[in-house]
Every structure is written in C-alpha cells, then in structure tokens.
Image (spheres, rainbow, N blue to C red):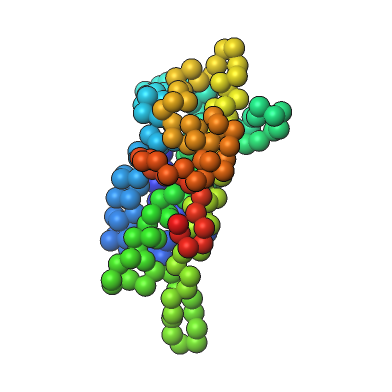
Amino acid sequence: MFIDQSYFIGPLTIAQLGQKAVDDKLKDFISRYEPMIMEAALGYDFYKAFLTGIDVGSDEQPEQRWMDLLNGIAFTDIYSVRKRFVGFGNTETKISPLAGFIYYEYMKDLASQNTGIGLVKTQGENSVSANVVSKPVNIFNDSAYQLRAFWELMQADQQKTTKVYPEFSPDNSIGYRYGVYNHNWFYWNNYQGNESYSFRTKNTFGI
C-alpha cells in the first residue's frame, strides 16, 4: 500500500480512529480501494511497473523516477506552466489523492449505515447531522485535481523524445484518456462510461 492510516489527518481526520474497530475498517477500505484507484489512474501495466520499481531490497535504492511519483515532483506542462504533482505516498507531507478518494468512500459508507449519523456538529447539548455530503465531496474533488496534475505530468512526458515513463500507456488510463489526452476536461468530468473507478468531479449533492 502507498498510504496508511497516518494520512487521515487535518481535514481528512476520521473520528475515533484510535478505536480498533474503526482502525480495522479504514485498513479494509485502503486495501480495497487503493489498488482499484491506482489501476484506473495509471493503467494496469504502469501500476504494476510502479509497484515493482519501488519494491527493491533493503540495500537498494529505487530509481528516482519512481520516487518522484511516490513523493511528488515539480514539472512543466505542455503549455510551459510550472506545476507540482503531490505524489501518491509522500511520507513527509502525508498528502495524497489516494487518501482523499478513500476518505470519500469511507464517509459515504458511514453515512449510509443505519447505526451511524456520519458527520455531526455541536448544537448545545445535542448533536445533529451536519452536511454529510459537502465535505467529503469537496475532498473528493480536491483529490481529482491533485490526480489531474499526475496526468498532466504524463502528458508532458509523452511529448519527449526519450520518455521518463515509457511504461505509461494513454490507452490504459481512464482519466488520461477522457481528460488530458482529449484536451477537454469538461468531457472528462462528464464521461459516463464504465470506469473501474470514476474520477469525475462531483457537485455538492454527491453526483
């Protein structure tokens, strides 16, 4: 796994994470959704190449190109604009689009449980349901924009004579195919295909 429970801090904080039941549930969500998200975002072959690239022995150092995807990298897009991809598993910043997507899935599941009330806000001596949609949706959309930077990084790399990531195939990445590749983010946001995981930004109603 690229992330763990330590990435769920700040706006991604999950209540009672110190409790074993909550901790175990979050682990399950990470194990379930991280591979699904990575495969959809990178394409199966590139995802597996990435896993192999960082899975080296204790006396070896992964290639810098793989560490850049893991920890984040500044780059110049095809329009000569300097940008930064935050990385999929930066252990220092603890910021990753994976955490945001998984937070959204976790909170969506929590809100749908008959025994839970999801996010709450304090009102006098009682707690009432807060907006269980807007915060997770905003975090989901923020993660989608973070991931968009990754595709723009790949787009820039595709223009090079000697590619840093020759393993990447545009045809195998859902987000790249329906976004950067077509130079049309509107189309990407509204794509209605059978995605293995949808990265289309959502409105505050969660749709």
* Image quarter (top left, top right, bottom left or bottom right) of the C terminus: bottom left
* Image quarter (top left, top right, bottom left or bottom right) of the N terminus: top left
Residue at point 36% right, 66% down? 111
Q: Position of residue 138 (x, y in %)?
A: 53, 57
Q: Position of residue 163 (x, y in %)?
A: 55, 16
Residue at point 51% right, 40% down? 188
Viewer-side residue, 130 vs 22: 130
Confirm whether residue 173 shows in the render: yes
Viewer-side residue, 177 vs 155: 177
Left or right, 79 with reference to 68: right
Q: Is residue 27 above or below residue 130?
A: above
Residue at point 36% right, 28% down? 44
Residue at point 50% right, 54% down? 202
Left or right, 79 with reference to 90: right
Judged from this view, the residue extending furthest toward the bottom is 125
Left or right, 114 with reference to 6: left
